[in-house]
Amino acid sequence: MRDNILRESFGGLVAFVAVAREKSFTRAAAHLGLSQSAVSHAVRALETKLGARLLARNSRTVSPTEIGERLLQSVAPQLEEIDAEMSALSALRDSPMGTIRVTASDHAIRSVLAARLKKFLPKYPGIQVELFADNGLVDLAAERFDAGVRLGEIVAQDMIAVRIGPDIRFAVVATKGYFANHPLPGKPDDLMQHNCVNLRLPTYGGLWAWEFEKAGRQLNVRVNGQLTYNSIYDCLDAAMEGLGVAYVPEDMALPYIRTGHLVSVLEDWCPYWSGYHLYYPSRRQPSGAMSLLISALRYEP
């Protein structure tokens, strides 16, 4: 009898936990990969079987009732254990499977990840990788990411970090035509007198301060200009069009510097940073698929 109750209620329990956590039938359905009507039906069937209302609904949100909160606290951890065990078993299969969600800057995706994934993915057809371009700092757990990619200097100390790229530095660039009408900057503070192309970060919506270093002296300059983007590639394009001075990864600008279209300045103020790192929470044991991805991305000088 108890086996029948569990079998008939399991789908409803999964749907209920998803709705309670997402506070929305729509988001819960998207998370579960089901239709909203299917999720709603499963929850109603569970409420009918238990003879109790589990969710309080209004026009703006959904929240557990007192009984629903008790059920959520007791059932959710057990469902997580089942999910973790199923993932572990899946990782033991000969053909690794699973979806890995990674947040990374647009430059990291194009300069490092794209080429490595081109070789990695055909070897493991059961692995899916979702890349989300984001230049800000992201809470991996809250946003349900498996890993992130950022420069080594800004990875939190409580994360496990694996280096996946060489040292990197930025370059201050503009066209010859721009500098023909504006004096060359001799020091970072001189950029305050130039029309600079800003990069807006999604974290708190602030503008990125250009970071410089020389002889142990660090200097952050908040530049001004007519253009602001949220993509470093758009910043480079603006500089290429003669619309101002941009501060971009050197590897992006180097082909145009070599052809003479762009001019690089303040090179002695542009430090090297420790390159891109893949990072993930130290308390989380990587899945089989994640372990394979880490090995494929690991930087070998």
Image: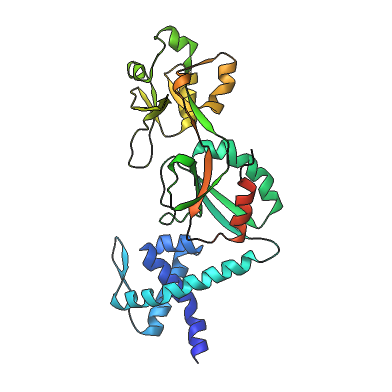
Query: For this view, does 137 lie left or right of residue 299?
Result: left
Rendered location of residue 250, percent (x, y): 53, 26
Q: Which residue is outermost to the front?
A: 215
The answer to whether 252 is drawn above or below residue 62 in the figure is above
Image quarter (top left, top right, bottom left or bottom right) of the C terminus: top right
**217 left or right, relative to 96:** left
- In front: 245, or 214? 214
| Residue at screen point 70% across, 49% down | 122
The single residue placed furthest to the bottom in the displayed view is 1
Q: In this rendering, would 58 be left or right of 1?
A: left
> In this rendering, does residue 140 appear at all?
yes
Going 47% across and 73% down the picture, which residue do you hit? 79
Number of disc labels: 0
Q: State the image coordinates of residue 19 (x, y, percent, origin top left).
A: 39, 67
* Residue visible at 50% across and 19% down in the picture: 240
The reply to whether residue 40 is visible in this rendering is no
Q: Quadrant of residue 291?
A: bottom right
Question: x, y (%) of residue 111?
Answer: 58, 35
Tell me residue 272's x, y (percent). 50, 30
Against 145, is 116 above or below? above
Q: Quadrant of residue 21?
A: bottom left
Chosen colour scheme: rainbow
**Compared with residue 91, is residue 108 higher up or lower down, i.e. above or below?**
above
